[in-house]
Amino acid sequence: MKKFISLTLAVATIIISAMPASAQNFKLEQPEICSYTYKDGVELEYDYEFLGTRKKLIHKPGEIEKVVVYFENTGTLPFYSDESGCDFKPVARLGTENYRDRDSIFYTNHSEVDTGWITPHRIMLDQKMVKPGEKGSFTFYIQTPDDNAVYREFFDIVLEGKKWMEKPFVINFDIGSYMNEKRDYLQYIDTTRRVGQEDLNGEKSIEVSIAEQRMYLKVGDITIRKFPVSTGKWSTPTPYGKTQILNKQEVRVGGAWPHYIMPKWMMFRAGGYGIHALPSLSFDNGYFWTEALNHIGTRRSHGCIRLLPEDADFAYEFGEVGMPVWVR
């Protein structure tokens, strides 16, 4: 019997020794919060809604300042923090987005305060556990640059080793002074970057590259969106040159047969040349629209500039009568 016990202990020792160091640190007894009871018949999913922030309206240059991000757990699974003690649950953190996992300019590891940052691109969840339907927060401190500008910082919740939530949100940090003039232009900039007043004073414009089959929406020198397009085929090319938006219509129907239906229409050159969403016909059960969808990114139109529906919605909202349009 003693030999049997010794052999059993030896085998157990070998198994534990062979386990990765991280696995050896797992606790057999997990905290009570780790045993969350799921409702029967409910689809298990992670989701959240960004609620807002608590921070100063204007931040002083070169200061250490506090920021709190609030969210609601709108999924059916709980979020756990680094300090939950739940070794077998994915940890929820706030991660930098647009561009993902970039080092934030606001990161600080100041020794006199718990900054909330785990790395230059990760922030710790405040609560050990945020159940479905509950509100949670991320508290962190920022080191503000010595500047006078708006810094747009994008974030998203990430479940480490499992998934990003794919719901990035932006926080505007006004450093030095509050910028009022043309501030609404900020909403169009969908990447993390510094924006000075000189950037917002730039002229809005649309540029289209025939070679790339791409449209660029710009404010001054800032490209705020880039979309794939379909321009005119070789036999009916899209004219080159600088023009402007002449008129806008929610939907334009072509006067000649077969009467193309063209949503989000913006005419940029006389003769019937327009920027619009993928066209369709009223009598073909969607066949022509589907064909046009497959052709996006190639030269296929009769000279117009076609966009995917969501891209056309944005371009239409961005466009203004009189705005310059460059086709290169």
Image (spheres, rainbow, N blue to C red):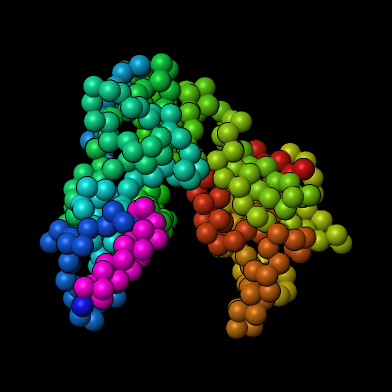
Find residue 188 and report its horizontal and vertical position in percent. 48, 42
Give left or right: position of 286 versus 212. Answer: left
Q: Predominant secondary structure in magenta?
A: helix
Query: 59 above or below 54?
Result: above
Which quadrant is the N terminus positioned in?
Answer: bottom left
Report if residue 18 is visible in the image.
yes
Task: Give the image location of residue 281, x and y in percent.
Answer: 63, 76
Compared across the picture, whether 134 is left or right of 123 comes to: left
The quadrant the C terminus occupies is top right
Residue 291 vs residue 82, the one in the foreground: 82
Q: Residue furthest left?
A: 32
Judge from the rendering whether residue 102 lies leftward or rightward of residue 38; answer left or right.
Answer: right
Residue numbers of the magenta segment: 2-22
Identify which residue is drawn at 36% across, 52% down: 21
- Where's residue 108, x and y in %? 35, 27
Residue under the image location 25 percent in, 50 percent down:
81
Tell me what residue is drawn at x 68 percent, y 74 percent.
291
Can residue 150 be found in the magenta stretch? Answer: no
